[in-house]
């Protein structure tokens, strides 16, 4: 298949890449030299989200952002020699003893420090309690079967081994929050230190494998829940079949992650192979932005001047359409609307039946497709049989495996010097969101007049133009960010873009309003969390404020409908994908009310009018009055940084309340309500004057009003200048900036004086308070260094340590939309 539009690969050795747009002109982009912790590949929504966890695309399986495998295999066969360039051959694992998501299990446990030797088989655990695994807090339901709210837990699980495992590769699978140490028959297998992760695998050493004899064996684990959510789950997995067909890999020569595209280049013997993943997440066209189709483009070029026989093999697995690998699926091959496809979906199709964080969709259908052509073949069936057939040059025949079929699409490019084409990766989720009891279609099918095939047909018709648009947008975004804050800042923004976009789902409410709903990834799975909406706002205020409104519309409706009747804003609308009302256990009254008021003022500032605020004036007034009464010296409560726990007299939270009151005053002024404007602006200035006295600690301001010799990032203060509020003297921000520069560690500025961890989205806000680019860059370089060096191969984490390059928690979250605060500053302050 020949295409008019080719694409280029970013190379670190050159300063600019160019590609032919089909009309003789050159489209350019600046290569991103940042080594990503994880590279975005397919980014449609919180469910259809695939990433590469290694520097080389073939060094690890493609994964979902949660860490679960999302198998996607790519192989190029050149003159009969196969080169694997993407993913790893998925070896089927079976549970020797499953985790709680695979089987029911029980263990004996205690929350009190046991005596030495508790991890050994001969220890007497008769006084311990018995409970069903997994163990954890209610936020981790339904995984957590036994509630564990204490700081520590020790668990002993006896397993019955029924076979000789000595010749097999064995893996411990575990999920933990926070520190965990796990032993098998008294042999330590893993000790994580302070971290929280799920679905981790570690290969057992030979000593541990040798200790596993048929009969009773012991897995013992200790977990320390430092703060917030707790979880402990573990099981033992074994390889079912170690047959590998694609052991030889290509030579990867470059990788380059742009805002909407990730480029790879490889050498496969005498042929160079260029691969590009494209997600057309362009905010100015919401129908396009929500089209559930991504592209995997390919180009082969002879590197010796000779023609070569080339074919490509792409393989996906049912995990793209089921929550757990053991769920049965139904596969199908066929052609429709000029599209050749292979698809998979769960056998049960329980639409919108599950809610939670570490879940993948198990309703709707995943498609791997291409424009119909004689050189395209599709099949579904046993993965090893299909791989062997491709290697041998035989036709690919579908053959059911009883609910676990692999999906294959093969492209025979013939005997040519160069060729190009693309594959589409698409998902039809049928219904996306439940909103106060009503199931809503995805935005692209809001009128119920589209199908996944009509969407793919449009994707084919618009391919050439979309490649140009995406390249142009990538270049624009990179250049804007570089002009605002330098090259390192631009590279971070380029990597962050798809992560932010894919953490949301767009639908239309029954009232015809946009609902752009975030999922609180890798935290608690809440939907439309206001304190995710707030930090992510700068990106949307820069590129499309309508989406910012879409994040706020549901929260306004919740209060205005009377479904939420408290005098402050709600925290969330439920647990993704069910938006039926707040589920979070503790309110954040000052936090969320301040967030909504400030964001309403930000929208008005960007748009130059306060019409959106006027629609919601009554509830905004209620929230502003609440902040007047309760905001200056907040009572014991949570703020956005809820992982740090409750505490009172929070100076940064007080700033949010003060600026929330001022924002209401600004909105009133824009609406011609001058008496109200003067009243609330005056009140805000009085509150700010009191704040300065209460928070003063010499050369900086305190973490809490009642604790001297403490400090914290006052990132909320950034809005005072951006919105033209001028409530605090400029000297307040500059005193803080000077102090922060004395507190930086190797990998960033700590969030506050309590811990050495940080939130890098807030650092971006703090840095934007700087009066010069040089100071701004001083805050950005440690974040860049962290992302470039961290061994934690996950989508960008926003909660990280500053003295070591490790993730503290959180990943794949929308909050890094806050990275665009410096760009927004440049647009609002000329």
Image (cartoon, rainbow, N blue to C red):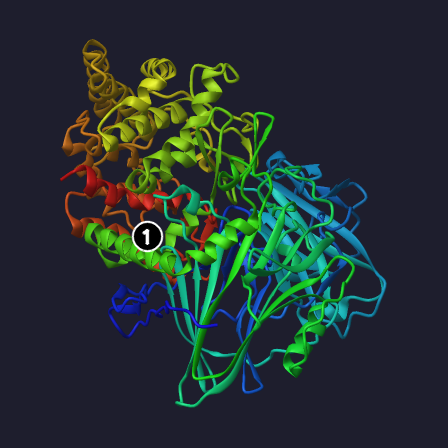
For this rendering, which residue is in front, 360 or 334? Answer: 334
Above-or-below relation of 764 to 206:
above
Q: Position of residue 250 (x, y in %)?
A: 49, 79
Report whether residue 729 is seen: yes
The answer to whether 518 appears left or right of 783 in the picture is right
In this view, the residue farthest toward the front is 337
Residue positioned most to the top:
675
Image coordinates of residue 315 in percent, x first then y, are 61, 66
Is label 1 in a helix, a strand or a loop?
helix
- Indicate the position of residue 454 as horizontal and vertical percent values: 53, 49
Residue pictured at 73% horizontal, 65% vertical: 238
Q: Is residue 369 left or right of residue 460?
A: right
* Placement of the C terminus among the 4 image quadrants: top left
Residue displayed at 32% across by 21% down: 613
Q: Is residue 637 visible?
A: no
Quadrant of the rendered structure where residue 820 is?
Answer: top left
Decide: is 423 above or below 416: above
Which one is nearer the viewer's eye here, 303 or 460?
460
When the figure is inspected, residue 309 is found, relative to residue 526, above or below; the finding is below
Closer to us: 24 or 773: 24
645 left or right of 712 in image: right
Q: Residues within 10 Å of mark 1 (few under 14, many from 20)?
A: many
Judging depth in this view, the residue of 617 and 715 nearest the camera is 617
Residue 107 at x, y = what percent? 76, 46
- Label 1 belongs to which residue? 493
The answer to whether residue 24 is above or below residue 339 is below
Q: How many marks?
A: 1
**Which quadrant would residue 27 be assigned to in this image?**
bottom left
What residue is rendered at 51% in x and 36% in y? Answer: 446
């Amino acid at each position: 298949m020949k295409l008019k539009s080719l694409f280029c690969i970013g190379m670190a050795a050159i300063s600019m890449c160019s590609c032919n747009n089909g009309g003789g002109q050159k489209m350019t982009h600046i290569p991103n030299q940042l080594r990503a912790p994880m590279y975005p590949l397919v980014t449609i929504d919180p469910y259809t989200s695939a990433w590469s966890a290694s520097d080389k695309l073939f060094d690890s399986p493609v994964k979902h952002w949660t860490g679960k495998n999302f198998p996607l295999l790519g192989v190029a066969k050149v003159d009969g020699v196969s080169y694997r360039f993407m993913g790893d051959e998925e070896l089927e694992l079976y549970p020797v003893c499953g985790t709680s998501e695979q089987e029911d299990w029980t263990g004996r446990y205690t929350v009190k420090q046991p005596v030495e030797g508790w991890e050994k088989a001969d220890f007497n655990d008769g006084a311990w309690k018995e409970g069903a695994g997994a163990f954890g807090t209610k936020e981790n339901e339904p995984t957590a079967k036994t509630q564990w709210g204490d700081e520590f837990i020790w668990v002993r699980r006896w397993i019955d081994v029924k076979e000789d495992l000595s010749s097999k590769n064995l893996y411990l699978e575990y999920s933990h929050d926070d520190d965990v140490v796990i032993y098998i028959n008294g042999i330590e297998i893993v000790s994580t230190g302070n971290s929280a992760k799920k679905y981790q695998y570690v290969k057992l050493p030979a000593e541990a494998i040798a200790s596993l004899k048929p009969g009773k064996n012991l897995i013992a684990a200790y977990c320390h829940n430092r703060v917030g959510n707790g979880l402990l789950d573990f099981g033992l997995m074994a390889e079912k079949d170690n047959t590998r067909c694609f052991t030889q890999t290509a030579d990867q020569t470059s990788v380059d992650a742009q805002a909407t595209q990730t480029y790879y280049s490889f050498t496969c013997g005498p042929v160079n192979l260029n691969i590009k993943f494209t997600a057309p997440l362009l905010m100015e066209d919401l129908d396009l932005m929500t089209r559930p189709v991504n592209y995997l483009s390919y180009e082969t070029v002879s590197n010796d001047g000779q023609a070569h026989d080339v074919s490509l093999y792409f393989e996906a697995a049912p995990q793209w359409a089921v929550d757990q690998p053991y769920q049965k699926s139904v596969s199908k091959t066929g052609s429709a609307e000029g599209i050749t496809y292979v698809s998979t979906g769960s056998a049960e199709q329980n639409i919108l039946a599950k809610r939670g964080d570490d879940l993948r969709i198990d309703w709707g259908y995943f498609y791997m497709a291409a424009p119909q052509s004689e050189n395209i073949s599709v099949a579904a069936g046993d993965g090893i049989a299909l791989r062997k057939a491709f290697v041998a040059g035989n036709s690919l025949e579908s053959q059911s495996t009883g609910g676990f079929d692999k999906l294959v699409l093969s492209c025979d490019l013939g005997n040519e010097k160069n060729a190009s084409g693309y594959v589409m990766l698409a998902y039809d989720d049928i219904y996306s969101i439940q909103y106060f009891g009503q199931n809503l279609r995805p935005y692209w099918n809001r009128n119920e007049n589209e199908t996944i095939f009509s969407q793919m047909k449009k994707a084919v018709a618009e391919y050439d133009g979309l490649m140009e648009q995406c390249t142009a947008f990538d270049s624009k975004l990179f250049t804007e960010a570089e002009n605002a804050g330098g090259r390192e800042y631009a590279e971070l923004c380029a990597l962050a873009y798809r992560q932010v976009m894919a953490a949301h789902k767009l639908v239309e409410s029954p009232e015809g309003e946009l609902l752009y709903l975030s999922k609180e990834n890798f935290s608690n799975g809440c939907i439309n969390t206001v304190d995710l909406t707030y930090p992510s706002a700068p990106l949307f205020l820069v590129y499309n404020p309508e989406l910012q409104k879409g994040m706020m519309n549901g929260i306004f409706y919740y209060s205005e409908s009377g479904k939420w009747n408290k005098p402050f804003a709600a925290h969330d609308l439920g647990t993704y994908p069910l938006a039926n009302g707040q589920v979070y256990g503790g309110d954040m009254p000052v936090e969320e009310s301040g967030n909504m008021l400030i964001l309403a003022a930000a929208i008005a500032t960007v748009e130059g009018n306060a019409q959106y605020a006027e629609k919601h004036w009554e509830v905004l007034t209620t929230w502003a009055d609440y902040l007047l009464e309760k905001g200056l010296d907040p009572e014991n409560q949570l703020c956005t940084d809820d992982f740090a726990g409750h505490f009172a007299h929070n100076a940064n939270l007080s700033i949010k309340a003060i600026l929330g009151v001022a924002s209401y005053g600004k909105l009133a002024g824009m609406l011609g309500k001058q008496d109200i404007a003067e009243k609330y602006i005056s009140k805000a200035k009085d509150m700010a004057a009191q704040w300065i006295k209460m928070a003063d600690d010499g050369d900086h301001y305190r973490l809490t009003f009642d604790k001297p010799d403490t400090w914290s990032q006052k990132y909320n203060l950034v809005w005072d200048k951006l919105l033209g509020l001028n409530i605090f003297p400029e000297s307040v921000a500059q005193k803080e900036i000077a102090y922060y520069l004395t507190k930086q560690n190797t990998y960033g500025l700590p969030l506050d004086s309590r811990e050495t961890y940080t939130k890098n989205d807030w650092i971006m806000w703090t840095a934007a308070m700087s009066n010069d680019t040089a100071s701004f860059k001083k805050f950005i370089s440690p974040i860049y260094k962290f992302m470039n060096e961290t061994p934690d191969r996950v989508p960008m984490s926003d909660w990280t340590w500053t003295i070591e390059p490790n993730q503290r928690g959180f990943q794949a979250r929308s909050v890094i939309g806050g990275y665009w605060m410096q760009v927004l500053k440049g647009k609002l302050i000329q």
